[in-house]
Each structure stands twice: as C-alpha cells, then as structure tokens.
Amino acid sequence: MRKVDFHNITWFDIMISTLLLALFLAGCNSGRPNNGSRETTDETGNGNEGNNSMGTHLTANDYARDIVNHPAFAGFGELLLARDDNTSYYNTHLSDVGFLMPYHGNVCPDVVLSAINRMIDEVNSGKTIFYDIYTEQQKQQDPTKRNTGLFFYRGKPDAPFAVVCPGGGFSYVGSLHEGFPLAKRISELELNAFVIRYRIGSEQYATEDLAAAIAYIFRNAETLGVSTNDYSVWGGSAGARMAGNIALSGVATYGGGNLPKPATAVIAYTGQTTYSADFSPTFITVAANDGIANVNTVDRRVENLRNAGVEVEYRRYQSTGHGFGLGTGTDAEGWLDLAVDFWQKHIK
C-alpha cells in the first residue's frame, strides 16, 4: 500500500475530497426521489407534511396525508380521500393507494396520481377545482353536508357536463380510483366532468346530494362554462345506484328541483334492478367474474330496460372483477371511450 504524505496535501486536495464525499452521501440518499415536499412525523405517527409549491406533483413515494396537506387542496384535501376521517390511513404510501378502497379492484397508482396531479396543475394555473354544493346555512343545519362538494375537470368550454358518482358501498367514496381518473378522461374527450363527494352512509342522502349537485351546476352553468343541455350521470357500484335513481325518477324526486332527466346514464357494475319506459338511455358495463354485482342480475336489468323500450348499450367483460374503474391493463380497458361515444349520440 502506498503511504500518503500528509505534508504534501494541499487545500485543493481537501476541496476535491470533500466534494467527492458529498456526492457519495447524496447517492446513498437517492433511493427516494425529492418531489419538493418536506416530511416529518409527530408523536402521533400521522405526520406533518408540507409542500413547497402549488405546482408540486405527488408521486407513489408520497403518503395519503400528502394529498390532504397539499396546498393546492387547502380547505378540502380530506374530501379527496375515501372517508370522512382518514387519519388511520395517513401513513399509507400512494403506491398502496388501493388499500384505501377495499371494494375496488385494479387500482393503478399511476392512474390515480395522474388524475390528482392534473388538479394540481389546474390550481397552479389559477383555476378553481372544488365547489361547495350547499350553503353555509345548510351545512349548519346538517353538519354532515360539510363533507360534500364537486371536483371539476374542464373540457371544452360550453360543452355538456357529466357528474361522476364513485362507489364504495356507501361506506366510503372511491373518488381516487373511480372518480377522478374517469373525469380526467372525459375532459380529455372535450366534455366537462364533475366528481361528486357525497354523504357517506345512506343511498337516499347520497342521491339527494347528486340532485343538489345537478341543481348547483344548472344554477351556475354560465360561471362554470358548461352547457346544461344533454348532461349525463355516471356511477360505479354504489355510485351507479345514485345515477340509476336519477335516471329512473328524476332530479325533483330527490329535492333538486324541476330539471330535465339526464340525456344518458352510464352505469357500471351494480346489482340495482330498477327500470321504466322513461329511464334515460343507458350504457351498462360489468365483468362476468364480478364478486359483488351478480352478472345475471345485470343481464336481466339490461333485458328489462330494452323490453321497456329504453336504448341500452351493454358491455360485458370477462375477467376484470368488481370496481375496475378505467379498467387499465384489463379486458375492459377502453370502455369509457365507448360510453362517451354513446353519450355523444344523445347530445343534440
């Protein structure tokens, strides 16, 4: 081994050595990318997170709490997650985001994050993405209405709108998987899309929230930049029951006022059986191996609707399971574009 003569070491040598050491230590810490967020954990284990800019994107290495605390979602961040109280899920990595929505399958973190980051971009460009559907007085009279609202994905100005109702068995609202990604894709097809955050625990209350949301959009259509002609309602599982209720009975039945029925209902994987001759034209989809919504029940509903004279397009897939959202990477991938095509046939 060659001996080092410390008497001949210069300041330049020390500076080079220090630089090399710094680069080495940086490499050791490079396993978790720096996405512009700062993260600490308090003694409760829930964490105290802060993002430096409205434009900071979330990644799969972030946590559920980072959604709640992101400055782009100030005042409503909790409503992006599935439950009214999500604190026990705050330490869930977004790479495991499906853990937050146990009734849903095929939850793809990249798809979820793309939809969330789209909203961050909208806020960063000065746009409003969240709207209250109830007044402060209504919230004071019924505090559960504080956990409601609409998330807006803009398409072409003055194009018709869709309201997307995520499922979750009325025990949670699966917007991360079954709401935001669908609305993002609808907006990419130049139509406007809202995702409703409704009250948890009751199909009746949830459908009342949907009626209130439709009425809110009609009242504020000019400000929102949407057409009220030929709107559609979309739902998956429990959310499909909400959409089906409006398609069957109308908005007024659930307290939303004398408004037209939707031009189209898009109903995914639900065991709801209702139908009538004046049911909205309907696109229905399910997987044959759905373990929650019995495919035979869905088949019978399609037959009953058609026999009643309702136009129905039915897409039955084979192996996608329940709650497949966009169906990315499955045999159901692309179903949403087919549903939009069906809706556009009914846009005058």
Image (spheres, rainbow, N blue to C red):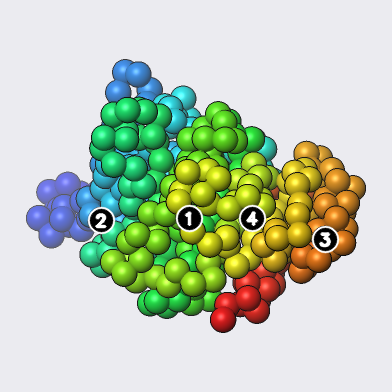
Mark nearer the N terminus (3 vs 1): 1
Between circles 3 and 1, the one closer to the viewer is 1
Between circles 2 and 3, the one closer to the viewer is 3
Q: Residues within 10 Å of mark 3 (few under 14, many from 20)?
A: some
Label 2 to label 1: alpha-carbon separation? 40 Å
Camera-side residue: 117 or 78?
78
Residue at image mark 3: 308
Residue at image mark 1: 258
* Quarter location, residue 216: bottom left
Between circles 4 and 3, the one closer to the viewer is 3
Residue 54: x and y in percent read 25, 56
**Dot label at residue 196:** none
Between circles 2 and 1, the one closer to the viewer is 1
Residue at image mark 2: 54
**Residue 39 in view here:** no
Residue at image mark 4: 247
Residue 277: x and y in percent read 76, 59
Label 1 to label 4: alpha-carbon separation? 14 Å
Label 4 to label 2: alpha-carbon separation? 38 Å
Q: Is residue 246 left or right of residue 62?
A: right
